Amino acid sequence: MSSLNEIKDNSGARKKRMRVGRGIGSGKGKTGGRGVKGQTSRTGVAIKGFEGGQMPIHRRLPKRGFTNIFALDWNEVSLGRVQTAIDAGKLDATAVVTQAALVEAGVLRRAKDGVRVLGSGELTAKVTFEVAHVTKSAIEAIEKAGGKVTLLVSKTDTGESAA
């Protein structure tokens, strides 16, 4: 076992960079791998999408689609993940399951615009959910287990126009 002051890379782990334009004997001398004459042999050339004056393909093709600036980003969580957290003792089944409770339990990494509960997985605990959105299959599974669901009013459900 070596000590800290003797640590070094494996041989061949660090390759020396090719020094360009340092004489014929270096293997990358004279033109330095840039070919002969022309625009690209000179410095300061940035012609990624340039097609010799012809209209570039990225400008010839039409634009498609749009980005909805009012779209909400949901935290999606399955009933199976909730049950796993309850079984592990991270989530209290007797308390109301909210977005904050799920983040604190480590089921969700961070809070987004609201929680959407999905019906995949099996729920055996009697749990009360207080979330923004629940799928039909999730509602059936929660009520079958003896729990209940309260939907929160989100930003778009207030009935006000976005304009």
Image (cartoon, rainbow, N blue to C red):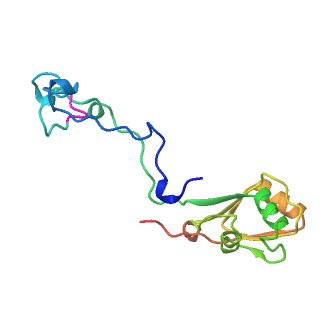
Is residue 33 visible to us here? no
- Of residue 147 and residue 5, the one placed in the foreground of this image is 5
Where in the figure is residue 36, as x and y percent of width and height? Answer: 12, 21
Where in the figure is residue 54, as x and y percent of width and height? Answer: 18, 26
Q: In which quarter of the image is residue 127?
A: bottom right
Q: In which quarter of the image is residue 110?
A: bottom right
- Residue furthest left in the image: 37
On screen, residue 130 versus residue 49, left or right, reads right
**Residue 134 inside the magenta-drawn segment:** no
- Of residue 33 and residue 55, the one placed in the foreground of this image is 33
Q: Is the magenta stretch mostly helix, strand or loop?
A: loop
Residue plotted at (32% across, 31% down): 61
Residue plotted at (85% across, 68% down): 147
- Of residue 156 and residue 36, the one placed in the foreground of this image is 36
Q: Is residue 157 above or below residue 95?
A: above
Instruction: Specify start and end residues of the magenta stretch as a single range.
Output: 47-51
- Of residue 132 and residue 115, the one placed in the foreground of this image is 115
Residue plotted at (83% across, 72% down): 93
On screen, residue 3 versus residue 104, left or right, reads left
- Residue furthest top in the image: 36
* Quadrant of the image containing the C terminus: bottom left
Q: Is residue 18 above or below residue 73?
A: above
Where in the figure is residue 99, as x and y percent of width and height? Answer: 66, 70
Mark count: 0
Is residue 133 visible to us here? yes
